[in-house]
Image (spheres, rainbow, N blue to C red):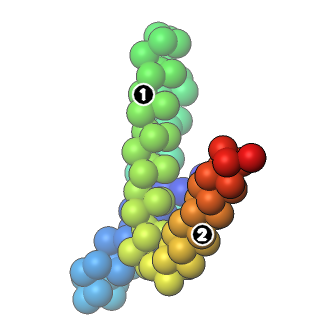
Amino acid sequence: LGVVFEAPHRLYCHLTRNKCTEETYNTEGMSVWVEKPLHGLEWNLEQDNTLLSGLVFWLAFVLLVAINLVEVMVMHWTAVAVVFVAAVMVAQNQAQGKKEKKFW
């Protein structure tokens, strides 16, 4: 979970560049960017209302996945470009294959 919780921090540091020169850690050596979401997750799991707890969990999950996708697009844009070009080529190839089948 630490890797997922660290994604907003990595994105923030990448976009602000000079803001992350001094990192802070707790007594266990855990980054504050990981510690706070972990405490939130632990709190959520301790709640009695299963429906609300599940809803909060899935909303947080979707948010973190979205942040991870933005992080990949910002920090690894060349890989995203390669995947995009490959997807376009596959789509064009499939579309061309369907056109050829219509005439036969």
Compared with residue 41, is residue 71 higher up or lower down, i.e. above or below? below
Question: Which sits in the foreground, 12 or 95?
Answer: 95
Compared with residue 39, is residue 83 higher up or lower down, i.e. above or below? below
Identify which amino acid the numbered label 1 is placed on: Val
Compared with residue 40, is residue 23 higher up or lower down, i.e. above or below? below
Q: Is residue 9 left or right of residue 93?
A: left
Q: Residue at x 52, y 12 (%)?
A: 50
Question: Which sits in the foreground, 27 or 12?
Answer: 12
Write down the quadrant of residue 18 in the picture.
Answer: bottom left
- Residue pointed to by mark 2: 89
Mark 1 crowd level (few <14, some 14–19, many ≥20, 10 Å Cα): some
3D distance between C-alphas at marks 1 and 2: 39 Å
* Residue 17 image offset from top left, x and y in percent: 29, 87
Q: Residue at x 44, y 22 (%)?
A: 55
1 and 2 marks in contact (CB < 8 Å):
no
Question: Which sits in the foreground, 104 or 41?
Answer: 104
Q: Secondary structure at mark 2?
A: helix
Q: Secondary structure at mark 1?
A: helix
* Residue 67 image offset from top left, x and y in percent: 41, 57
Identify which amino acid the numbered label 2 is placed on: Met
* Residue 86 image offset from top left, x and y in percent: 61, 71
- Residue pointed to by mark 1: 56
The answer to whether residue 56 is visible is: yes
Q: Residue at x 40, y 63 (%)?
A: 70
Q: Residue at x 58, y 63 (%)?
A: 92
Give me the disc on residue 37. Answer: none
